Amino acid sequence: MIRRSSNQFMYNYQRSLNRTYNHQSKLLEQSDGSRLHRPSDNSIDYSKYLRYNFSQNENTQYQTNVDNALSWMKVSDDALVNMTDIMKTFKAKTVAASTASQTDSDNQAIAKEMYALIQETVALGNNQQGDRYTFAGQAATIRPFTLSEEQYDRGLAKTLDEKQAKFFNTAETNDEITQMLTLKTDAGDTYYLDTNTGYIYTKQFMDSGYKEVLAQNRKTVDPTQDAFAKLGNDFFNSGTSTFTDATQSTNFKISDFFDSRGIVRDTVDSSGDSAVANVGLAFTNSAGEIVDIEDGTQLTMAAGSTVTAQPGSLLVYSTADSAWHFGETAGESVTLDDSVQIMTQNGNTYSYATFNQAVANGDVTLTNNMWIRTITDANITFTNAQNVTVNDGTYVINGNKVTLNSGTNFTDSNGTNYTTTDHMKTLNAIDSNGNTINLKLMTIAQTIVSYSGDNNYISMAKLNGSADQSSDTVNLTGADIFGRDLFDGVNSGNDASGCAMLNNMITVYQKTNGSDQSWLSGDGVEMADQIHQTTNRAESKLGSRQQLYTAVKDMLITQNETITSDIVDVSGTDIAKLATDLMEQSSVMSLALSMGGRILPMSLADYI
């Protein structure tokens, strides 16, 4: 028989009591609904709990992102709904303007309504959510769309309908309308250039001739039979005079002649300088008829011949030769009539006569690089013969580019008076008989919308990783809403302008204001229809993505419920069992304390 001391009994009792107390404390701890408060509670379940908790945090973040995305898309969709309504109205106005019964005053009234619709569309394009522009791409703090006040020469396009596009095998994408470039001869005949192949077709063939071919059961174009002409040798990669097949690429690029908005490009001289002198040169003959000046033609101005300075012409004084010159670098010396009104750098205004008198009196000191600016039309006389060269539609005086304003005459060395023609590029083409002809790229003067945003997409659904444009992106850019056309299409050589349909709308407006019902009844109605289709596709695209995000939100809510259930399963407390265990432990604890009071030996304090 092993003898146990009273100390051993006391130690065993206290250890059991503490174990019971700890167990009771853990049970009380689970009264908050969770049985896992530390890894030691259950290491396997605790690792599951951490994993589920991380998934729940991710799910919560995704839901926040989706809510933000839906808010962004809702604001964008509201603007697009209004845009498509505007486009529908614009199309109806175009159809109304194209009818023969409309008078000039009727069309001008319709044009005013069209321009108001264009301005409203631009305003909707600058739609914001908070301080961010929804259609500006990732450049969301920059106002994306701007409508110019001044007019620019924009290329005139021929818009193909669905049947024409299919017949001419013209490549197009869902966001690009199919167009050809309008050309004209000096006689005023209209032709159209397929910029993808270099073939040129008559207006008659484009309007009705191709239908006769279709009636003969030929479904696609055969340029060797149908084309009126083809671009000259200089525009072909092969350098040959004939096409080898209908798909041969050419050196012709829209980007060489027009920017992405369709504005005619000016050729800058070799120094890269802009217009040195804003001199209005105009080319007509003595009978007032416009004279066509071919590229490379050199016109020598007789000494003493006069040109008219437009308001704002800048002249700089040089002490080297005591003479006035156009711009800061031009070498031509000019003299001014006494009647010229000028302004000096300090803002003082003189006639040239009073300016010279002020110089003579010492009130004005002529110094090197001092400049004066003409502020009224006046004659400027060239003191020396000047060579005027025409290069790619740009007029150059002694190597310095000048800007041409129409309505002003000058005389060449033969005494012939000239007035400026339009500065459209003349293309060299070869007709079906092998004859070389000249065709001009046609333009139309109109205001222009410019896009300052970018074409990058925003993803709010992902925390990291690459974005899937079809599902992750929440925004539409200018190119998505307003598509692409001839001047910024995939084969143009230009990047997407972000405002193609807006500038096409302005072209329709301009034609309506000019009562060009022949153009409106064909190109105008087709262009207005495709403008509407482009924006309608953008609205449908955003609407389907919005539905996708709504479905994703519902999925995330369901997923969150599943994750919550998993967390409860792995960490939740069984309340009924907990209550039973607590009651059991409380009874054990009470019994242990009661028994301990009876069997434990009394202490010295108890005796005292």
Image (tube, rainbow, N blue to C red):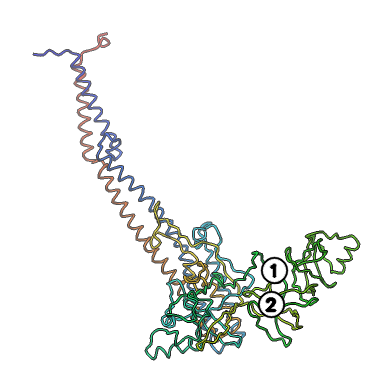
- The image quarter containing residue 188 is bottom right
Image quadrant occupied by the N terminus: top left
Q: Position of residue 500 (x, y in %)?
A: 52, 71
Distance Cα–Cα, label 2 vs label 1: 14 Å
- How packed mark 2 is, by other alpha carbons closer than 10 Å (few <14, some 14-19, many 20 or more), is some
Q: Which mark is residue 298?
A: 2
Q: Is residue 183 visible?
A: yes
Q: Amino acid at mark 2?
A: Gln
Q: Residue at x 56, y 78 (%)?
A: 156
User: Which of marks 1 and 2 precedes in the sequence?
Assistant: 2
Image quadrant occupied by the C terminus: top left
Q: Amino acid at mark 1?
A: Asn
Residue most extreme to the front: 240
Q: Position of residue 6 (x, y in %)?
A: 18, 13
| Residue depth check, mark 2 versus mark 1: number of the one nearer the observer | 2
Q: Residue at x 55, y 68 (%)?
A: 122
Q: Residue at x 38, y 87 (%)?
A: 218
- How packed mark 1 is, by other alpha carbons closer than 10 Å (few <14, some 14-19, many 20 or more), is many
- The image quarter containing residue 36 is top left
- Which is nearer the eye, 143 or 164? 164
Q: Is residue 306 above or below residue 476?
A: below
Residue at image mark 1: 400
- Which is nearer the eye, 416 or 561? 416
SS state under label 2: strand
- Name the side, left or right, on which 494 lies relative to 378: left
Q: Position of residue 184 (x, y in %)?
A: 57, 84
- Which is nearer the eye, 262 or 431? 431
Q: Is residue 13 above or below residue 427?
A: above
Q: Is residue 111 visible?
A: no
